[in-house]
Structure formats: structure tokens, C-alpha cells
Image: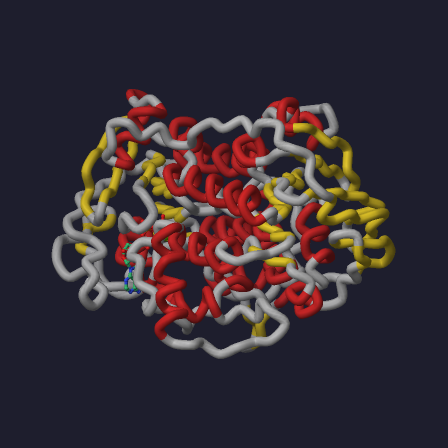
Amino acid sequence: MYGPTLALAGVDFQVRAGEIHGLLGENGAGKSTLVRILAGAERQDGGELRFFGEQASGGPAERRKAGLAFIHQDLGLFADFSVADNIALSSGFSTRRGLIRQSASESAARAVVDRLGFDCDVTKLVGELPLADQTLVAVCRALAHGARLIVLDEPTAYLEARQVRKLFDILAGLRADGVACVLITHRSEDVLRVCDRVTVLRDGRSVARRSAAQLSEAELIRLITGREDASGNVPRRPGTRPVRRLRMAAENLRGAGFGPLSLEIREGEVLGLCGLADAGQFAVGLALMGDAPLSSGTVALDGRPYQPGSVRTALDAGLGYVPANRTADGLAGGLTAVENVLMSPRGPWWRPLRGRSDRETCQRLLETFRVSPPQADREVMTFSGGNQQKILLAKWLGFDRRLVILNEPSAGVDVGAKADIHRRIRRDCEVNGTAALVITTDFQEIVDLCDRAVVMRRGLAVGNLEASRISADLLTEMAYGGTA
Ligand SMILES: Nc1ncnc2c1ncn2[C@@H]1O[C@H](COP(=O)(O)OP(=O)(O)OP(=O)(O)O)[C@@H](O)[C@H]1O
Ligand SMILES: [Mg+2]
């Protein structure tokens, strides 16, 4: 129970040694709550919990010692610490005469990183790594102390296909060593590819346990949503639309990790900018928002020069921005949903909340975005991960923006909500003439959502595809440089 909210109402959940067990369910079904209870970070109000045959006891530290490892949805890393220190914080620092031996932590970290085949400088600060790499650091940290049960709460949300494959290879290897894994994911292809069995939660109850080999994708989606007709993501082929005015023209942009790059986007257009995680696409978004310097190039918005300088300038010019990392950069944790949605300094003047009418506007937005529960006055961090993502989108899509830059817009949302979010983005563009720049490593998202796609590799644009030519295979091939 969270106050009056019943998060888990009756869950039966068993994981065997040496299996990969999928824990599935819609946004808000109770998956992360269950994980926090397993981790000892929260107490259950009833029921029994056993690990390796023993009654569970103690808090997070004891459970870690007992051989459990958890990768929470928000990763829980320390951004200002190095990769090596983050790993050592969990597996223990090596000390000599009371002093931490930095070199020992570093070589221990390097050993795990290498075991994962993950190309990473362990002396770098975690906060400086792309989100995909931060996920892998969290995985390394879990592996570092020889856990026998590893629980991963949506590890693949920010990973590109190649990294997902690598992670799954590692999990499969652990299975052979008798390690049990619990995998939470909203991608049904992940589940069918790697899981042995699945447990499905709905409204805080376990409603099904199945062996994955017997499941089809359609059946899986039906179990998760509880609806017969649930088709998941409606395949949508963007049609040709009337040619509209040029909204943004960027020429010869150069910045850290990309360039020279030219981009054009029209009013009402949904343009995908994609590539492998390190292709430079995220840096382009940051530079357009004035959050990273441009070393050269020009940008015009509606025919007028636009000089990215600071986030303030970008907002005043009519841009909107959904960052990839919603908990670090997107949402203000201690504030309520209404405060988060409305208190963005969107217009030229920041204005304080106006009370009732604002609350009603926000309430309507939460309902259109199907945020659950639709409670504007609730603290934003008490929403489930997928619902936080919907709130973040409501903050920018609910208003007239000229250009919205959306990083990984559907990260962590369930199949049904993903289709909803795609419809919302397209409607916003169609009705308000907003141009959307969708930056993602999820190629299927580009296929489902975008009118056009620009593919980047090593900081350069290597392809510009109209909707009719976009396919996940072609995007992959271009992103890898034709060697996939
Ligand atoms: N700290 C909290 N206070 C109040 N309610 C909470 C809190 N944490 C979670 N809840 C509620 O508990 C329910 C289950 O949330 P949980 O985060 O476990 O969902 P989830 O299955 O992990 O969803 P997602 O796929 O979106 O991450 C939701 O209704 C959520 O709003
Ligand atoms: Mg969750």
C-alpha cells in the first residue's frame, strides 16, 4: 500500500535457478513495486518471501550479501562518480591501511567491463556517459559481486539492438552458470527471444505464468492488456501529406561528436534522426537546444535566423525538448504532476501557477495522455516509470511549440501506450503544425512514427529516407554502414 493506493494486491512469483524469467505488465501494473520489495527497499504488507529456500530478511545491504542484485528502472548510479567507483560501491573497495586503492577498483571494474565486452573507460564519470552506457554500467555493477539472482527493471529501454543482443548473450551465459534472472521489459520481442518463463501482472495481481516457448506475440499482448482485441502497436504507414512550409533549416552544423550536418524539417512533419547509440544524433538535439555548443553552422526557424545559445533562448524561440533521461533532466522529482507540466518556462515570461484553471488544464492533459492515475496533485515520482514518461510528453506536446525535439519518446511505456503516444505526436504535428524531431535508437519507432528519417553514422548523415522507403532492416543496414 502507498497510502490509499494498493500497488500490489496478490502476487505469486517464483523464479528457478538458471532461468530467465520475464516479469511483464502494463504501466502501473506493479512490476517496480515488486522489485523494490524483493530488494528490501520497501516492505510488503503481507505474504511470504523466500530466497534460495530461506525466509527473506534484512534490508538492501543484507539481500545484496545474500546473492541478489538489482538494476532499478532509474539505474541508481552516482553521476558524479567514475564507472570504477560506481562498481566498487557495490562490490566493495579494496583498501590498504585504510586508504582506497584506486588502481585496484579500476582493474576490478575493467575485468567486469571486459567480461561484458563493453567498450568503456572506467575512469570516466558516469554522468558523462550516454544513457545506453549507463545501463551497461548498472549491469556491470550487478555482475561484479557474483550475484545468484539478478533482477533487471527495463534494462533495454535505452539500448540499441546490438547492445540488447550482447546483454542477452550475457544473461544466457549466466543461465548456464545457474544464475537466475528476472527481466522486466515492454518489448515483446525481447521476451520471446530470451525468456524461459514469464509472469504477467495486471493491476497488482499475478494473472498468468507461462513458459515462453508456448507463447505467440499476440497472446503475450493479450495476457498483458487483458483485452481480446489488443493488437498492440497499430502498424501505421505515414501517408504523403501536403507539402508545407519549411520550419527549420540547419546547415553545416558542427559540434562535439557530429558534423558537418544539414537538416531540414517542415511544418507538421515528424522527422526521425537515428543511428547507433554513439552516432551523434543525441548531440545534435542538445546543440539545437543550446545545451551544447555548436562550433559552426547556421540555423533558420521559419525563415528567420535562430542562434542556439542557451535553453532559455531555445524555449523563447518556440522549441520544446523531451530528454532521454526523464528522472535526471526531465522531471522535477519533489513536485507534483501539475507543477511539472505547467511550470516549464515555456513562454517568454515565466508565470506562477494560477490555481484551478491550471489544474484543470493539467487534468485534461493527463487524461488525454492516459496517465494512470490521472491525479494532477500527485508527486511526480510516485507515478510508475511509463506514466512519468507520459507526463513528460504532456508537458511539451500539450502546447503550441514550433519544433519539439523528442529523445526516445516511448522509452519505458507499454505497447498500448506506445501506439497512443505515437498518435498524439502525429496529431500534434498535424493540427498545430508543430514539427517533431524524434531522436531514437529504436528503429521500429522510426518505422511506426516518422514521415522521414535521417540516418547518422559517426556524426554524419548517411541517408535520408522518405516514409515509403523506411524499414527497420534498411535503417539498421545504413546505421552499421552496410555491414549488418
Ligand atoms: N511511492 C509511491 N507512492 C504512491 N503510489 C505509488 C508509489 N510508487 C508506485 N505507486 C503506484 O503503484 C502502482 C504500481 O507502480 P509500479 O511503479 O510498480 O508500476 P510498473 O509496473 O513498474 O509500471 P511501469 O511499466 O510504468 O514502470 C501504480 O499505480 C503507482 O502509481
Ligand atoms: Mg516500473
Q: Quadrant of the C terminus?
A: top right
- Residue 228 appears in the rendering: yes
Residue 182 image offset from top left, x and y in percent: 35, 42
Along the line of sight, the residue nearer the viewer: 315 or 246: 246
Residue 66 image offset from top left, x and y in percent: 31, 56
Residue 198 image offset from top left, x and y in percent: 29, 34
Q: Is residue 303 above or below residue 117?
A: below
User: Relative to 284, is 476 on the left or the right?
Assistant: left
| Residue at left offset 77%, top offset 37% | 461
User: Relative to 261, is 409 on the left or the right?
Assistant: left
Where is ligand 1, by quadrant? bottom left
| Residue at left offset 76%, top offset 43% | 263
Q: Residue 193 falls in which quadrant of the image?
A: top left
Count of all numbered marks drawn on residues in the image: 0
Q: How is the image coloured?
A: secondary structure
Q: Is residue 141 above or below residue 264?
A: below
Q: Is residue 334 above or below residue 155?
A: below
Residue 283 image offset from top left, x and y in percent: 71, 52
Q: Is residue 312 above or below residue 468?
A: below
Along the line of sight, the residue nearer the viewer: 199 or 7: 7
| Residue at left offset 63%, top offset 47% | 435
Q: Quadrant of the N terminus?
A: bottom left
- Residue 176 appears in the rendering: no
User: Relative to 327, is 254 on the left or the right?
Assistant: right
Along the line of sight, the residue nearer the viewer: 479 or 466: 466
Q: Residue 466 falls in which quadrant of the image?
A: top right
Along the line of sight, the residue nearer the viewer: 226 or 257: 226
